[in-house]
Image (cartoon, coloured by chain):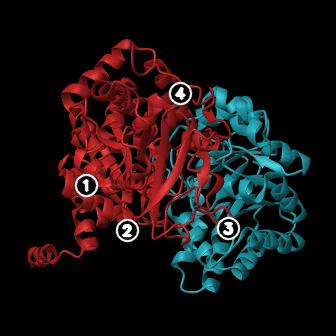
Chain colours: A red, B cyan
Amino acid sequence: MKLLNFKTKYDADASGHFGPFGGRYAPEMLIPALEELEREYLAIKKDPDFEKEFLYYLKTYVGRPSPLYFAENLTKKLGGAKIYMKNEGLNHTGAHKINHCLGQALLAKRMGKKRLIAETGAGQHGVAAATVAARFGFDCTVYMGEEDIKRQRPNVFWMQRLGATVVPVMEGSRTLKDAVNAALKDWITNVEDSHYLLGSTLGPHPFPSLNRDFQQIIGYEVKQQIQEFEGRLPDMLVACVSGGSNALGLFYRFLEDSSVRLIGVEAGGEGVNKKGRHASRFAGGTLGIVQGYKTIFLQDADGNIAETHSISAGLDYPGIGPQFALLKDMGRVEFSSATDKETLHAFNLTVKLEGILPALESAHAIAEVIKQAPKLSKDKIIVVNISGRADKDIFIVAEALGDKDWDQFIKEQAK
Amino acid sequence: MKKIKLMTHVVVGYPDIASTNELVKAMEQAGADYVELQIPFSDPIADGPTIMKACDTALKKGVTVRDCLRVMKTLSDQVSTPLFFMGYYNTVFHFGVEKFCKAAKSAGAYGLIIPDMPPDEEQHEHFIKACRTHHLAQIRVVTPASSSHRLKLNAEVSDDFVYCVSHFGVTGSSVSKKVGFESYLKRVKKYFKIPIAVGFGISGREDVRQVEPYADIVVVGSAIIRIIEKSQSFKRALEEIIMLIRSLRA
């Protein structure tokens, strides 16, 4: 086995605690299902046949390895470190989410489950979940905040074509965290025949470790690919972080390579000094226990979850994956944030210079690269994760850029 | 045959704080043996849409944990029915576990029902310990999915009675998936040598009749909030709630 049995000194203990974070703070209704999932998780980590099947579908269905690409024009423009892009946007379904969806679908099959439940923010996880459900013969229900349905309508359409039932969530802020609540409740109700295909490295144990293990393929490939390009390790890895699935996927295999700087980029929204208008957990977040795990949450004085905002639905979430909370505490991962404005600038630059359309989530990471690269000498190497492509963001980008032709087109279509 | 006891439920501050006070007093007069005062929380994952909306309304009105403690104090001075705080662990954790338990006790709470704080996390949280220190009854919640191991684990740390969720689902959902009460509650009784409360989806006399042979306490929550939701005035709702409570064991 080369992939799933990998371990680091930053991993959870047997009860799912990453130092003071993580754990399994679930109501009793969910604990039997989480225990069952944990047993299977521990079993597949040691099962070469499972890994073989996982790798087979990653190659033939997802299209891995995804390319590592030298962004020559952006490198020249910024005038500093060499910038490489790991392009997860070229995966089947257009983002890294398919990696853990595939893994969890194979796991659900092993457990004899008939139905998959998923939550989604940007819709990338929802589309990937609906895709594996179609491929492996599961019924599928995807919960999506009403606000996000408006923002990411194309993904809703594709989920429905793939046979999934998309349920709009009208509670709370009507975004990702409310979709997680709704999915958890569905699971509580249908725990016997359904698997909750949770979409990030968050939630109660074993989800944070489980999804990380399926996503580590990203960094695993980068380590080989950068060796072919440069014959050495990169100096810096950059990725956007909400729950943390793409970032941990890129970073995990480098955690114990202390020469590699790791930077996670949170959603700065309209600015981290504007309360309720960003989703940067490390700008004002405090320790809390919500949705089954302990981590840093944006919350009010009574522990109620605060409103968040980001131009990207996928980063619009109030809690950070527990392993990242630990990695920040230990000083292994640095965090910064990018505002909506910086993100749009990074998006435009990448499109024009490299002909790559990064998802708005991923454009947050590029915004950080724009800040970092000029400060580094030309012999330094940065790898940035393009966690997904921007097809889903067409409405948001068109509106944010004030594209009149598009606006006209939409109005005509509406007739 | 012994008469089954009744625990009713309110969300503090729904529809407003004055009504909560009135409601709990009326519940006692109508014959409730215990009342749960739920502290509104933004992400109540064990609750269905009815209680969730009530929490939301209360929070939008600005109801705080301090308000809940004040309501508890007011009511515990006026009623003799044991009053519980029901809530989610982040509320307790954020207030400070020790500090919260102390405040709840001095406000007159009889005990706490916190469904998302499993005994497995006690070594990190010292929540059960704080309940003991401050003499608060700490009520465990179990479900039809709970294995013998889970029942045993919860039984070891539970006080007064055990709260059995009647079916697979969240609060307020109807008891559509029958789980075979008899064998489920028999399993519970094997590990818990204390009274059995059954809740989730109990809304009328018929539901009570179903659980009566196996349970000591029945819990009604969402059904009461639904009456408030639908009524044109709180006064009318109150009358209807009193009628419902009286009818449950008639």
Image quadrant holding the C terminus of chain A, namely: bottom left
Q: How far apart are marks 4 and 3 (CA)?
A: 52 Å
**Mark linked to residue A256:** 4
Q: What element carries label 1?
A: helix
Task: Give whichever of discs 2 and 4 has the lower sequence position.
Answer: 4
Q: Is mark 2 on a helix, strand or loop?
A: helix
Q: Which chain carries label 4?
A: A
Q: How crowded is mark 1: few (under 14 residues within 10 Å), some or many (20 or more)?
A: many
**Amino acid marked by disc 3:** Val
Q: Position of residue A244 (x, y in %)?
A: 46, 44
Task: Give whichever of discs 2 and 1 has the lower sequence position.
Answer: 2
Residue A227 visible somewhere in the drawing:
yes
Q: Is residue A245 left or right of residue B78?
A: left
Q: Mark 3 lies on which chain?
A: B
- Dot 2 corresponds to which residue? A341
Q: In this view, does B158 lie to the left or right of B132?
A: left
- Please tell me whether residue B185 is drawn above or below residue B108 in the rendered image: above
Q: How far apart are marks 3 and 2 (CA)?
A: 45 Å
- Dot 1 corresponds to which residue? A350
Q: Residues within 10 Å of mark 4 (few under 14, many from 20)?
A: few
Q: Is residue A238 left or right of residue A408?
A: right
Q: Distance between the residues labelled 2 and 4?
A: 34 Å
**Amino acid marked by disc 1:** Thr
- Please tell me whether residue B13 is drawn above or below residue A362 in the rendered image: below
Task: Give whichever of discs 4 and 1 has the lower sequence position.
Answer: 4
**Amino acid marked by disc 2:** Lys
Both labels 2 and 1 in a single chain:
yes
Q: Distance between the residues labelled 4 and 1?
A: 30 Å
Depth check, mark 3 against mark 2: the one in front is 2
